Image (spheres, rainbow, N blue to C red):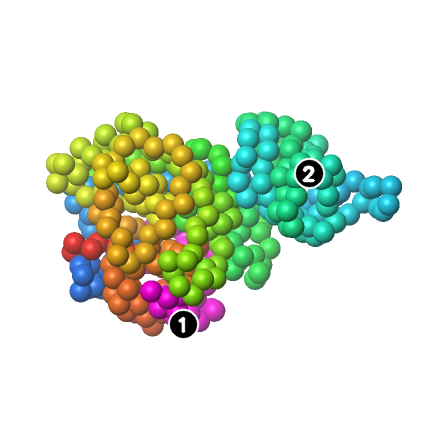
Amino acid sequence: MVLSDFDFDLPEELIALRPASPRDSARLLVVRGTEGRLEDRTVRDLPHLLKRGDILVANDTRVLKAALSGRRTARADGPDVEIEVNLNFRVSPGEWSAFARPGKRLKEGDTIQFNSGLEARVASKAEAEVRLGFNRSGADLDAAIDLAGTTPLPPYIASKRAPDARDAGDYQTMFARETGSVAAPTAGLHFTPGLLEELAAAGIRRKAVTLHVNAGTFLPVKSETIADHRMHAERAELSASTASAINAARQAGGRCIPIGTTALRTLESAAASGELKPFSADTSIFITPGYRFRVADGLMTNFHLPKSTLFMLVSAMMGLDVMRRAYAHAVKERYRFFSYGDACLLLPNG
């Protein structure tokens, strides 16, 4: 398959700049079966769309305020320089890989000072990507980053407006526990305490996995031939107790429905051998049409960018023709797209 197979027209005004309020009032496009039957619902309908014994799997990663503004301290050959840093992924308890602008004004050994006493030394540099060693470590570093930084909004939102105080809450899911992401697992943004209570009362269980989302999630696919694309790696974890609960639910006839593509990619990585097992490793799994799903019996997810690896993933689950038709329907009906937008519930078995 080629990249142009996954292209579609999207009016710019359908890119959501704020989430629905309340969160579970977002619209939900249900796509059923290989023939792709479509239903226009809302996220609040989820307890009635799933069945007793099903198990939802959320990503419990927590997003850091990973956009940092700092100052490179003066060298003998010049003054201080303003530097914008976007964290990418954690290398060690006190080190992060990051993107810096202007990268050409940095070299190994430079020190960048941020707000709240946070500072970092440039340990290595490759063009705009730098490895930063901070003066804090572990949970202390996480807390300092949250004080010094701002919410790392996706490029398609950040290009239209600056982050503000609302985003600190809006861009964090209810499930957030494990700090380490620089982008939100956005399907989880639709849940509220009331919705979780209704799901539990309907006999729908919930478990969590962890995948720390890095900035690679926004990288475009540049290879015209899909098979030539190489995915970025992200850290993922699945506990033994969660693996056991999912296996038991499926053996009893329940369906495993990941909340978002990051949860799905974690599950499918953990089941690479054919059996779902505990998992703790980097994953660069790339799911395209023709892939055979081992664990995920469906998926709740947002609407994705044209020609993105995530649109390829949903096309793998439902079929490219079905998803092109579903997205055309969503555009016609004015659904809201991307991180703060509406959602889909994909049920390939109807």
Q: Position of residue 12 (x, y in %)?
A: 47, 69
**For residue 2, what is the image quadrant?**
bottom left
Residue 16 lies within the magenta run = yes
Instruction: Say whether residue 236 is left or right of residue 165.
Output: left
Residue 129, visible in the rendered structure: yes
Please tell me which residue lies in front, 308 or 203. 308
Nearer to the camera, 87 or 159: 87
What residue is disc 1 on?
9
- Between 268 and 329, the residue placed more toward the observer is 268
Left/right placement of residue 164 relative to residue 274 reads right
Q: Tell me where residue 278 appears, x and y as whole percent.
A: 31, 30
Image spot of residue 306 (x, y percent): 41, 64
Label 2 is placed on what type of residue?
Val
The answer to which of marks 1 and 2 sits earlier in the sequence is 1
Kindly state the secondary structure of the residue where label 2 is placed. strand
Residue furthest to the left: 252
Judge from the rendering whether residue 247 lies leftward or rightward of residue 289; answer left or right.
Answer: left
103 with respect to 272 (left or right): right
Q: How far apart are marks 1 and 2 (CA)?
A: 42 Å
Name above or below for residue 263 compared with residue 335.
above
Residue name at image x 52 percent, y 60 percent: 156
Numbered marks: total: 2
Q: Please provide the residue range marked out in magenta.
A: 1-28
One can see residue 166 in this view: no
Q: Is residue 202 above or below residue 41?
A: above
Q: Residue drawn at (66%, 39%), measured in percent from left and top?
A: 124
Residue highlighted by disc 2 = 122
Question: Image quadrant for the N terminus?
Answer: bottom left
The C terminus lies in quadrant: bottom left
